[in-house]
Image: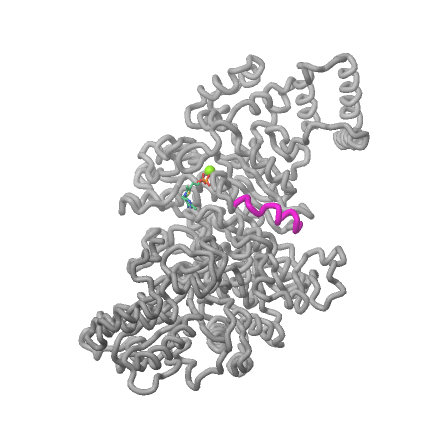
Amino acid sequence: MQAKAQLEQHIIAKQHAPLHSSDSDPQETAEWLEAWDQILDEESPQRASYLLTALTERARSAGLELPPPSFNTPYWNTIRVEDESPYPGDMEIERRIKSVIRWNAMAMVVQQNKNDPGIGGHIATYASIATLMEVGFNHFFRATIKDQEGANQPGDFVYFQGHASPGIYSRAFLEGRLSRKQVENFRHELREDPGLSSYPHPWLMPDFWRFPTVSMGLASLNAIYQARFMRYMENRGLIAPTDRKVWAFLGDGEMDEPESMGSITLASRERLDNLIFVINCNLQRLDGPVRGNGKIIQELEAAFRGAGWNVIKVLWGRGWDPLFAKDRSGVMLKRMEECVDGEYQSFRAKEAKFLREQFFGKYPELAEMVADMSDEEIWSLRRGGHDSIKVYNAYKRAFEHQGQPTVILAKTIKGYGLGPSGGEGRNLAHQSKKLDENDLVNFTQRFNLPISEEDAKAAKFYMPQENSPEVIYLHERRRALGGYYPTRETKSDLVETPPLEFFKEQLAGSDGREVSTTMAFVRVLTNLLKDKTIGKRVVPIIPDEARTFGMESLFRQVGIYASQGQLYQPHDSDMFLYYKESKDGQILEEGITEAGSMCSFTAAGTAYSNYGVEMIPFYIFYSMFGFQRIGDFVWAFADARGRGFLCGATAGRTTLNGEGLQHQDGHSLVLSSTAPTCLSYDPAFAYEIAVIVQDGLRRMYHEDEDVFYYLALYNENYAQPPMPEGAEEGIIKGVYKLRAGDGKPKAHLWGSGPMVNEALRAQRILAEQYNIQTDVWSVTSYNELRRDALRVERWNRLHPAEPERQPYVVQVTGETEGPIIASTDYMKIVPDQVAPWLNGRLISLGTDGFGRSDSREYLRAHFEINAESIVAATLSRLAREGKFNAKKAAQAMTDLGLRTEAIDPSLA
Ligand SMILES: Cc1ncc(C[n+]2csc(CCOP(=O)(O)OP(=O)(O)O)c2C)c(N)n1
Ligand SMILES: [Mg+2]
């Protein structure tokens, strides 16, 4: 009834003024409106709405141009009071629990900043989101869940707003899952009693956090792709279906990150009703209001509704319901709609008097409505996100909604309950880490906490008795929901990975046939997909480049995942390799979204923990558009202990020719080296790929190591040799001798990727034209060589009395003499990584500088990495060492075609 009254008021309010100044017949308009009002009154809102829809359709089919639809609803709650369900829990007890959690969360940060000024932490964000969290913890977030076959699966997935972490810790503390020591050591992770990480980091707290979120925007995109991957697992029969949900708690400021909103249409297109976004609309970000001059909630509503989401607004607490009921003229809604967020913030940042005067006082009728309310009563009119009943109803409706993802836009107050020094509703809220004594005492009074004034002033933790009703209730609720939350499972179903013989095709070489390492890799992938043990676990992920990499045969072989199957007959269906989409397709053909693909890679690479099923993702991307575009997601993947293979195809600044500056990658190996758990490889030959992939599969899926791989894959075709005997160890560790010269070498030529062939050509030139013997080595990973050397060096440093150990790179080069000329299609800093252990012997030739469009031949000459440049560098260095005639070396520069006076390519 009340909602009907609300609707009526809205209409009456609008009726007072003519709808348009161009109304040529107001009398007729009034009659139509009256007729419609009657239907609303005497029949139902549904019927009234139906008639409007029918009229609109009629007008459209008559060819009338109608004003564009509005994607906004009035600035009130989506769920009508009469449609609300009663609260299923004991609200009073939950309020008391929440108050304790609020207090301890605040105390954790305040105490630590007293002990250690500058250590940081946030109090205002959790203060705003506490109710949104607690309703979830008490009634929605399931820790385990029974699937359709009755088996236990990990429960719902919750992406927590990262900097609300003190509240999550505070709850776990109350549950007895975190000790007092741990909580006291919030943000002190390196002490004798290690404490808690600043934000959600599975790397640092692997039994607790599941999803790294605090870098703004990562949670939203990862949650969307997680929900989609859950369907993928179900549709492929890898897990039994459940009604499990993916919840993402996001900040309203965070929604400005392009990653936050960039893929929301994927969620609606895929009908991800397992996905629920809760946006904590406290109207503020770090510096100030999110939209001071507008309304962030209305903006988000329109965008999400337009993108096909189910939108639920939770704006006003139940205290407002009687006021809405009184508001016969619609003046309150009118006032709510005309206020911008900057004003809403001020109403809260000041005091009740200000709210009465500035909000209600603007219109006499409105002021009249609250005339008999005290300032205290006015002040306690809550926003929707602080009202458990409103929040519960929104969650329930989101949980039950089918066919669409849901976004809940919950209006809250940043720093709720923290008072002026805690920045309640103020621009400084985000930075606030301390409360003055007055506000600490007020806090305990406001939330009825039985804390003495003295303890309050000291911001001491408060812990109710074990057998108190609050603690009993808390445990009982969690038991009902399958256990404590959050927790991260670390069990995985370890896999029997293939032995090296499985890759015999790659180990044997190509018998003179010219193939690229990308093609060789695709053969490896194809064979793995066919393997009975691990084939079904392989997840090929490609952002619209499969044809570029020669992978299109996989479309037909294993199918492209499409949740709706294939609703059309593909034009190439009469061909063997047609574009096959299917519900149980295995390939994730993502379209042009490197970030989205990375999120699929993340969902698959962490499936061992999230679903208890080891999946083996291979994400093959255009190498230039990998790390530098989505580096933050890679970092989060490492934090999440993800496993899998990232494959940068069309690698190399000169091997990918023609494409020019924006495409030619000479630095992904530098960027990949920054992720601590990423093993970077730059293989030259098919057999090297086989050895690396085999070892990677073993380490990640059999030995259970939390590492992942980056492989640079090239598109230059050349004959693939068979594997030299005994090369495996060197391939994995990073370097091995590929071809010795005829006699004692005067220098060593190191090559990586296709540059190995240039090194081999240089070896011939040096021998034939300059009578200098050299050995050629293939360096598969400078990065791994460096890591090994750093580890050994550290050990030596810390154990000065023990016999010195030798890094691998020293073991293999120690007996050799002469300069080492390293050529790479990547920047010189890649080989330079091992320079400290080579006693000044290393000369790096690489591709520093912007790329160009031209053929490989010209590009390699330009960057001075071709065989001629390797020869010239060798002669030059030998001349400097007095082992070759300097004049001859200078002459060789000209003979070999080096442009000695040209601009340095790193500057060109
Ligand atoms: C990518 C990124 N940029 C900047 C930050 C720093 N930062 C942390 S919280 C925050 C403000 C968040 O505002 P909002 O999303 O509205 O959350 P609230 O605290 O208001 O709930 C900023 C800028 C970050 N964590 N990640
Ligand atoms: Mg905010």
Residue at (65, 51) in percent of width and height: 270
Q: Is residue 572 left or right of residue 207?
A: right
Which of 589/510 is in front?
A: 510
Which of 463/218 is in front?
A: 218
Residue at (64, 67) in percent of width and height: 554
Residue at (62, 70) in percent of width and height: 536
Task: From the top left corner, tell me how far across and down residue 591 is, in percent.
Answer: 60, 54
- Any magenta on residue 470? no
Task: From the top left corner, tell me how far across and down residue 425 is, in percent.
Answer: 43, 31
Is 217 placed above or below 618 here? above
Q: How is the image coloured?
A: one colour
Q: Is residue 813 left or right of residue 690?
A: left
Task: From the top left corner, tell me how far across and down residue 259 is, in percent.
Answer: 51, 47
Q: Is residue 649 left or right of residue 116?
A: right
Task: From the top left corner, tell me how far across and down residue 286 is, in percent.
Answer: 40, 38
- Any magenta on residue 266? yes
- The magenta-colored residue range is 260-271
